Amino acid sequence: HEFAHGLTCKRFGGAVHEAGLMLMYFQPAFYCDVSDAWLIPERWKRVVVSGAGPLAEIGIWGASTLVWVATASDTLIHAIALVVMASTGLHTFLNLNPFLKLDGYYILSDWLAIPNLRKRAFAYVGTVVKRIFGIDATLPDVSDRDRNVFLLYGLVASAGAFALIGVVISTMGASLLDGGQPLLLAFSTAVWGIWLAVLCGLLLLWRAWVWEGLAILSLNLMSGIVAKPLWDNLKSYQQ
């Protein structure tokens, strides 16, 4: 994925200054510095640089799907192909989500020719929310087109974050109820309630990193829920 970003950036004349391993939201992740892509004048080339990583993962997903179909269901390679197919497919789907600050976001930002789209959209919607609550705030002077984009992006991104958190809560709650752990469910609900109260207090600040961090946390929790049956499936093959 990251090699695809770097090679595409170099192909279009950019320089790759560094690549390696980093911690992103408390989890290890590979990275490749393709910031030189912003210096590429052609917009379509910048879009291709951002889309190269997901395209590479789609290729891996396709290859693992072929292996999964072509191998016997009781073999280890079949189980490994299933895990690779599921993980790369889910990761690509999430990576192309334009409401998280991942490749899909940069593709959309370049396509709309609006730098710092997420930050500016949250700032604009935050100003609107402050004015609704009677707080004196000045709306930035933007074009009608950019204003519509900021409102649409900011509102949908925020609603999506809340919806994702709700799905995680309901899924974990159902799992706890099935496991006969009502006290743990009540404790978890109370913790989430406190978090929600804190978030409502931060709503007027409308900081993009709050929603982004919550979305990433929720996605990690949901990934764990989704990965459990795959792990159980892999262990059954090993047995």
Image (tube, rainbow, N blue to C red):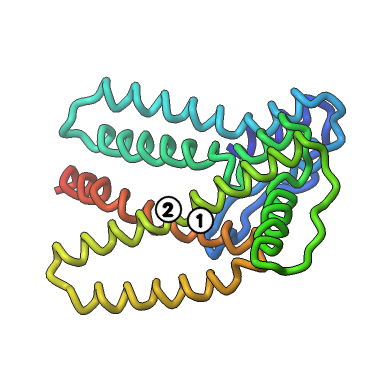
Residue 184's image quarter? bottom left
56 left or right, relative to 207 = left
Residue 188's image quarter? bottom left
- Residue type of the residue flagged with mark 2: Leu
Look at 84% across and 28% down and name the residue there: 13
Q: Position of residue 140 (x, y in %)?
A: 82, 52
Say which element carries label 2: helix
N-term mark: 1 or 2: 2
The image quadrant where one finds the N terminus is: top right
Residue 79's image quarter? top left
Asked whether 176 or 12 is in front, the reply is: 176
- Circle 2 residue: 164
203 left or right, relative to 44 = left
Look at 42% across and 24% down and name the residue there: 62
Look at 56% across and 33% down and name the residue there: 54
Say which element carries label 1: helix
- Circle 1 residue: 215
Q: Position of residue 166 (x, y in %)?
A: 38, 58
58 left or right, relative to 53 = left
